[in-house]
Image (cartoon, helix red, strand yellow):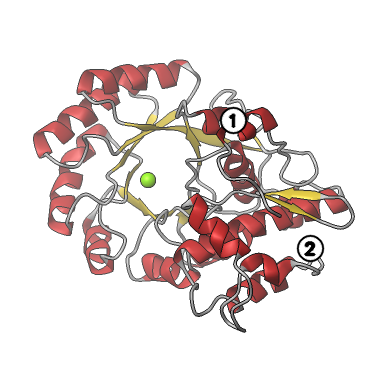
Amino acid sequence: MRVHTDEGITGIGEVDSGPTVARAIIESPLGHKVWSGLAELLIGEDPLNIRPLWDKMFAGTVYNGRSGAVVHALSGLDLALWDIAGKALKQPVYRLLGGGYRTRVRAYASSLFGDTPEKTFELGRQYVLQGFTAVKFGWGPFGRDETLDMELASAAREGVGRQADLMFDVGGAWDWKTAIRREEKLRAFGPLWIEEPLSAEDLAGYAKLTECSRTLIAAGESEADLPAFDRLIREGGVDVVQPDVARCGGLTGAMRVADIASFCRRQVANHAFKTGISIAASLHFLAAIPNALILEYSVSDSPLRQRATVQTFPVVDGYVEIPRDPGLGVDLNMETIEEYRWIETKR
Ligand code: MG
C-alpha cells in the first residue's frame, strides 16, 4: 500500500491479511467515534506523529478492531508512516527506532516441506548450496503422522547437512500430548526450534510443552494484538517470539512485542512470508532490537515474493544487509504491481 503526503513523500507499507478485507477496513467512512475507516483517521494529520496516530487508529476502531484484520490493516499504515518519516528525515528507519545493534542479520531459508522425504532432502541441499546456514521446513505433509514426520525430518537434516541450523514448522497441527512426544523424537535431528506445534489458542498446552521441551518452541505469527503476545510469552512460555510486522501493528507494534520478549529473556525471530516490503521492514526491526535471533527469508518462487520490490535483499554468507537508504529502503516494482492488481485504486 502507499500513503501520500501533501509534501510529495509517499510511504510504502504491506498488510499480510485478506486484501479486500483490509482495503474495506482502510477505506470505510466514519461510522462513529470508535468505529471508523482507518484512512479517515489519518487524513490531515502529521505523518511524523507515528505513535499518537497508531493510538488514534486503535482507539478509532475499538468496536470492530483491537486484533485480527483491523490490526493487520493498521500495520500496513504504520509501516508506511515509518517509511515517510525516514524519507522526510533522510534516515533509514532502524535509526529512527533507536539505532542499530547490527548492520546485517543472519537469514534462514523458509520453505514448505517437499511432498516427499526425497523432495525435502533435495530442497535442503539446494538452500545450503545457495549460501543459507539455516533452513526451516513447514506445513505440507508434516504434522499428521509420526512415521512420516520422522522421515521428513531425517531427510531435511540429511539435506542441509550437520552444520546448518534446521527448524520445523508444524502449523498448529498437534495437541499438546502429541507435541511433547514428537519433540522428544525430533531431538534426534537437532532442531534449533519447533514452530507453532499447537493452535494459537492453546496457551495451557504451550505452558505444559515449553515446561518440558528441550527444543526451543517458537510461535507468534497468528497474533496481532499486544495482549495476545504478552499471554503467549508469559503464560505460554514460548521461547522464540515471531511477530509479523505486517500483522502485529507494524513496526510500532513489533517493537513493543520485542520489549516484552526482552524483559522476559526471550528471543525474537520475525515472521514474514510476503513481499520485499515485509523483508525490508523486518530487517529494520531486527536491526533495532537487542534480542533478534534470525530473519525469516521466504524462498517461495511467488512473483510477489520475488518481484514486488526493486530491491532483492541478497543473502551473502548466510546474512542479509540492513537497508541504509532513507525510509524502509524499498521501491515498488510497478510492473509486477500492475500485473497483479485486480481492483482499481479509488484514492
Ligand atoms: Mg510459521
The image shows residue 161 at horizontal and vertical percentages of 33, 21
Q: Earlier in the sequence, mark 2 or mark 1?
A: 2
The image shows residue 196 at horizontal and vertical percentages of 31, 51
Residue 47's tag is 2
Q: In terms of depth relative to the viewer, which is nearer, 164 or 33?
A: 33
Residue at 59 percent of width and 30 percent of height: 339
Q: Is residue 322 left or right of residue 117?
A: right
Q: Nearer the viewer, mark 2 or mark 1?
A: 1
Residue at 18 percent of width and 58 percent of height: 176
| In the depicted structure, whether residue 265 falls above or below residue 132 | below
Measure how far apart labels 2 and 1 are at the Cα level. 30 Å
Quarter of image, res 44: bottom right
* Secondary structure under the numbered disc 1 in the rendered image: helix
| In the depicted structure, whether residue 136 falls above or below residue 245 | above
* Secondary structure under the numbered disc 2 in the rendered image: loop
Residue at 58 percent of width and 40 percent of height: 279
What residue is pinned by disc 1? Answer: 339
